[in-house]
Every structure is written in C-alpha cells, then in structure tokens.
C-alpha cells in the first residue's frame, strides 16, 4: 500500500481482528481456570471424534485450551502467522480461517483419536500450510517472498503433523495444514478468474 493512511487503517483493522481473537481465547481460559475453576470445564466443547455433539467443536475448539501453558504456546504463532495471512489483503483472513477450521475440524472428527481435541494449533498449522503453499499457487513476488520467510521462521513446525508427542492432536495439525493448502489453492483460483 502506497497510501500511509490506508496502511494505518488496514493495520488497525488487523490488530483489532487478531487482538479480538486472542482476547477471546484468553477470556475463555480465564473463565475456565480461574472463575469456573474447571468445575464446568469448557473444554468439553472441543471436537469429540465421531460423536454428533463433538461436531460443535469445529467452531469452538480453536478458542479453547488446556491451561495457560497451552494457550501461551499458541498465542504468538497465531498472532504472527495470522498477520502474515492478512498481509496482502485483510479480507483473505475471513476466507482462509473458516476453510482451515472446517477442514481441520472435520478431519479430526472423522479420523481423530478418541479424546477431546482443543486448541488453536490446527488453525496455526493451517496458516502455515496456507502461507507456504501461497507462493506456489499465486506465483507473485510477494507471495513467494512471504512463503520463504514463513518457511525459515516456522518451517520446523512441519514435524508437528506427525504423531510424535502423546496428548497432542497431530491430527488437528495435519488436517489444519491440509486446510491451509486448500485455502491457498482456492484463493489462487478465485484470483485467476
């Protein structure tokens, strides 16, 4: 953006969107841990594979976490990668995020291990997949540069799509990543039309 006022306005919008999402995650965790003292346990609203009630988790799971350590580990990557998703066009965030949530959530619901799956990491891996694949599908300088930057900063996360740590939803990571790649392909096709 060559217009400084337009850039400032877009940046303010991006901060509001990302800040609001993170504030919601933190508010829910504070309610769960401090106010409810986990007597109500909001985490039951996560994805429960192959149970009809577990489908609601497709919408709620990214906002729920298993304690503050889990939330802290997801906050910075969500903020950074979410902002990178918005960097070329803020509105793309509202296309990419639902695609990732749907693909990740349905993948976990259909094929996930029997547990309650929660956390923003499926969305984070989706953003990673989107940003890495975007350069390939868009084939413009900024997208390729962003793909290389994200690959150098967060490329090591890719191993999280493999079952390597007990208690971690690698299925959410894998299907989130796939959802991100699908979102990159979808947006590239929309632009080519």
Image (cartoon, rainbow, N blue to C red):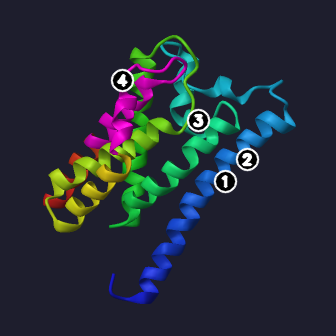
First of labels 4, 3 by sequence position = 3
Q: Which of marks 2 and 3 is nearer the N terminus?
A: 2
- Asked whether the beta carbons under mark 1 and mark 2 sit within 8 Å of each other, the answer is yes
Q: Say which quadrant the C terminus sits in.
A: bottom left
Occupied quadrant, residue 64: top right
| Residue 134 placement (x, y as % from top left) | 23, 53
Res 126 → quadrant: top left
Mark 2 or mark 3: which is in front? 2
- Which residue in the protein does label 3 denote? 60
Q: Where's residue 99, x and y in %? A: 37, 42
Q: What's the CA distance linking mark 2 and mark 3?
A: 13 Å
* Image position of 150 with respect to 29: above or below: below
With 170 as the anchor, is 30 left or right in this view?
A: right
Mark 2, other Cα within 10 Å: few <14 / some 14–19 / many ≥20: few
Q: Mark 1 points at which residue?
A: 23
Q: Do the residues labelled 1 and 3 touch (CB within 8 Å)?
A: no
Write the residue at 54% across / 36% down: 59
Report how far apart the C-alphas of labels 1 and 3 lie in the structure: 14 Å
Magenta segment: 155-181
Label 4 or label 2, whichever lies nearer to me, is 4
- Element assignment for label 2: helix
Q: Residue shown at 56%/28% (left/top)?
A: 57
The residue that label 4 is drawn on is 162
Say whether disc 4 or disc 2 marks the residue closer to the N-terminus: 2
Distance CA(mark 1)–CA(mark 2): 6 Å
């Amino acid at each position: 953006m060559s217009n400084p006022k337009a850039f400032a306005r877009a940046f303010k919008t991006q901060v509001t969107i990302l800040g609001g999402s993170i504030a919601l995650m933190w508010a829910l965790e504070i309610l769960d841990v401090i106010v409810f003292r986990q007597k109500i346990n909001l985490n039951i609203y996560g994805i429960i594979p192959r149970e009809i009630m577990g489908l609601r988790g497709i919408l709620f799971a990214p906002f729920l976490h298993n304690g503050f350590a889990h939330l802290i580990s997801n906050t910075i990557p969500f903020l950074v990668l979410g902002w990178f998703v918005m960097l070329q066009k803020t509105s793309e965030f509202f296309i990419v995020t639902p695609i990732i949530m749907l693909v990740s959530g349905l993948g976990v619901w259909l094929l996930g291990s029997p547990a309650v799956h929660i956390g923003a990491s499926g969305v984070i891996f989706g953003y990673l997949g989107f940003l890495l694949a975007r350069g390939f599908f868009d084939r413009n300088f900024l997208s390729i540069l962003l793909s290389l930057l994200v690959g150098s900063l967060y490329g090591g996360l890719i191993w999280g799509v493999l079952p390597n740590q007990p208690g971690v939803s690698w299925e959410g990571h894998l299907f989130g990543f796939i959802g991100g790649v699908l979102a990159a392909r979808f947006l590239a096709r929309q632009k080519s039309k």
